[in-house]
Image (spheres, rainbow, N blue to C red):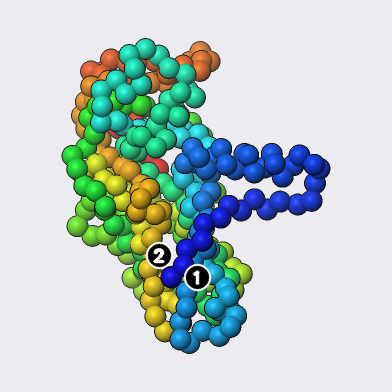
Amino acid sequence: MRFLGRLMTNEKPAGRWRKPAIALGVFLLVSLGIGPKVVDHYFLDAADGVADRLGSVEIEYVALTGRQDPLFQQGWAFGEVSALGTEAVTKAQAESAVVGRAAAVGGMTTRFVVRSNRANDLVITQMRARVVRHAEPLTGTLVLPIPGGGPSPDPIVMARFAVGGPDPRAYDGRDPARLLFADTNLVLKRDESMVLQVTGAAIGCYCEWVVDIELAIGTEVRTVTVPDVATPLRVTAPVPRYQSVYQPPFGAPSDLMTVADPTQACQGDCVVNPPAWQER
């Protein structure tokens, strides 16, 4: 199996500065862990013709459902106390801190876009959450989410995982009691793409996790891991109380995230009274 990473920008011929500007913008988003990351997977199978051997399975991983605001409807936790300091910080400073350092509280949603460039059908037969690190939930610093917004457009497929639970298989995001692959597979024709919205809910843990996607390629079943194990998704179950808390501005317009009383956050208990992070 060969992995080739690349960025995609759908560029069209334009003025002198358009391509450098687009490239810089994508680089900045990816460097923050927010922008799309695209990996081509090439598979060789004895039954493949020439067209299949040249074609790839392309998987684009978009953090935070493609949004560029990591604090929007998402709470974050750090293991350390006063992870952002002891004074108010700007929203930009909080965003920079949570990306790459904090874990999403309660649950998190990401999006994968699978595209097939192979001559024959691509069949997704299963998806599983794989925990690569399991520890106690984080209790140091809580950054409360910025509320608001309506529902986003529905993807083609919604998968939900109980991260850290006994069953790693994907459940239907629209019918939580139903296994997503109980009686069907997902099939892509050549040049088709499929949007997979993936939600992981932490089950009593701080968990670093990835999604193993099983693909039927010719005569074999191959497994692709998204994202890479070296840069896993991070989620932590809520705890009743944190040692330090930051909250977004309420009412008057402000760009500051202010220090809050930990005993008052979530009305005193973040498990009993969770903020918007569990309303997804």
Query: From the viewer's perspective, is the residue at label 2 or at label 1 nearer?
Result: 1
Q: Is residue 151 above or below residue 176?
A: above
Q: Residues within 10 Å of mark 2 (few under 14, many from 20)?
A: some
Residue flagged by tag 1: what amino acid is it? Tyr
Question: For the residues marked 2 and 1, what is the alpha-carbon distance in whole angstroms?
Answer: 11 Å
| Residue 171 appearing in the image | no
Residue at 33%, 37% in the rendered image: 103
242 sits left or right of 50 in the view: left
- The residue singled out by tag 2 in the image is 224
12 sits left or right of 70 in the view: right
- The residue singled out by tag 1 in the image is 42
Quarter of the view holding residue 234: top left
Residue 157 locus on image (x, y percent):
46, 60
| Residue 44 appearing in the image | yes
Q: Secondary structure at mark 2?
A: strand
Could you tell me which quadrant the N terminus lies in?
bottom left
Residue 213 locus on image (x, y percent):
39, 64
Mark before the other along the chain sequence, 2 or 1 = 1
Residue flagged by tag 2: what amino acid is it? Val
Q: Is residue 91 above or below residue 216?
A: above
Residue at 34%, 17% in the rendered image: 85
Please give the label number shown on residue 211: none
